[in-house]
């Protein structure tokens, strides 16, 4: 972003990468896919690079409002200094925080999740399924991320991105507003499991197995981790793939 501003350029959109998209090796593949899509359709975009910090979401969910506001205000000052108007995120947690919690601290932007951008590009005819991998014959199910679905009522965009594929789309018995959390949204990814009979991501993987899916589509890097751990627990690595909507879109378009 700083380089574009120095050159007197203004990007159409800021890509907020998020901590997972930056530092988690698996999630970095999702980041690359989003960048490939943006470049493919010719959208001018920028990233903050080292100026991007945590949105403060983990601090707020843990009850540390003071730390959250410190992190949020620092980010808002940077975004406002660059006069950012539109942001696309690769993470539902970042999406929810910047969209819904930054305005009250002085940070008001048009914020969309990358699945919403993909749906828009498909609707505009800028993204198709040409020249890439065929998903014909594959059974694909979509896992609703809590902060995208129940948190922000974004249910159709991820599904629309999959509907363009020549694949069999199937729903798990618990989906949309009744979807089962993978556990990441409840911080199970960062601590020992709470007392109970079964880890929640294992419970969710049993929904996937019941649906007999070949591919579980995800739209959140944290769901990605929990679902992949579930696949490993069931020893189904050779049978079930966990892919982000951006990765599926990029592969279908040969990017």
Image (cartoon, rainbow, N blue to C red):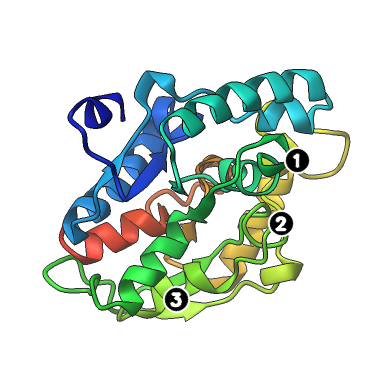
Which mark lies nearer to you, 3 or 1? 3
Residue 135 place in picture, x, y as percent: 28, 72
Residue plotted at (57% across, 61% down): 143
- Compared with 173, 204 (above or below) is above
Lateral position of residue 20 relative to residue 174, left or right: left
- Compared with 11, 115 (above or below) is below
70 or 165: which is nearer to us? 70
Q: CA separation, marks 3 and 1?
A: 27 Å
Query: Badge 2 is on which residue?
Result: 151
Query: Badge 1 is on which residue?
Result: 186
Residue 236 place in picture, x, y as percent: 47, 52
Q: CA separation, marks 2 and 3?
A: 19 Å
Which mark lies nearer to you, 1 or 2? 2
Classify mark 3: residues with Cα within 10 Å, few (<14), some (14-19) or many (20+): some
Element type where label 3 sits in the image:
helix
213 or 175: which is nearer to us? 175
Which quarter of the rendering shows the C terminus? Answer: bottom left
Classify mark 2: residues with Cα within 10 Å, few (<14), some (14-19) or many (20+): some
Which residue is at the far left?
131
Label placed on residue 160: 3
Residue plotted at (73% across, 18% down): 67
* Circle nearer the N terminus (1, 2): 2
């Amino acid at each position: 972003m700083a380089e574009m501003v120095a050159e007197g350029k203004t990007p159409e959109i800021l890509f907020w990468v998020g901590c997972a998209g930056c530092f988690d090796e698996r999630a970095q593949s999702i980041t690359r896919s989003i960048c490939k899509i943006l470049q493919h359709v010719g959208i001018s975009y920028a990233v903050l690079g080292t100026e991007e910090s945590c949105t403060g979401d983990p601090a707020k969910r843990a009850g540390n409002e003071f730390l959250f506001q410190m992190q949020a205000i620092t980010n808002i000052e940077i975004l406002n200094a660059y006069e950012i108007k539109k942001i696309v995120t690769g993470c539902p947690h970042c999406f929810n925080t910047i969209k819904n919690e930054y305005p009250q601290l002085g940070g008001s932007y048009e914020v969309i999740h990358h699945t919403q951008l993909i749906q828009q590009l498909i609707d505009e005819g800028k993204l198709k399924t040409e020249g890439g991998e065929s998903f014909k014959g594959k059974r694909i199910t979509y896992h609703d991320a809590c902060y995208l679905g129940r948190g922000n009522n974004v249910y159709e965009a991820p599904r629309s991105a999959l509907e363009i594929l020549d694949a069999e789309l199937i729903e798990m018995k618990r989906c949309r507003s009744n979807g089962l959390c993978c556990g990441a949204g409840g911080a199970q990814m960062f601590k020992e499991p709470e007392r109970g009979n079964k880890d929640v991501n294992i419970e969710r993987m049993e929904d996937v197995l019941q649906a007999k899916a070949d591919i579980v589509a995800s739209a959140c890097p944290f769901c990605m981790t929990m679902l992949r751990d579930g696949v490993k627990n069931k020893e189904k690595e050779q049978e079930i793939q966990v892919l982000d909507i951006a990765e599926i879109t990029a592969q279908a378009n040969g990017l």
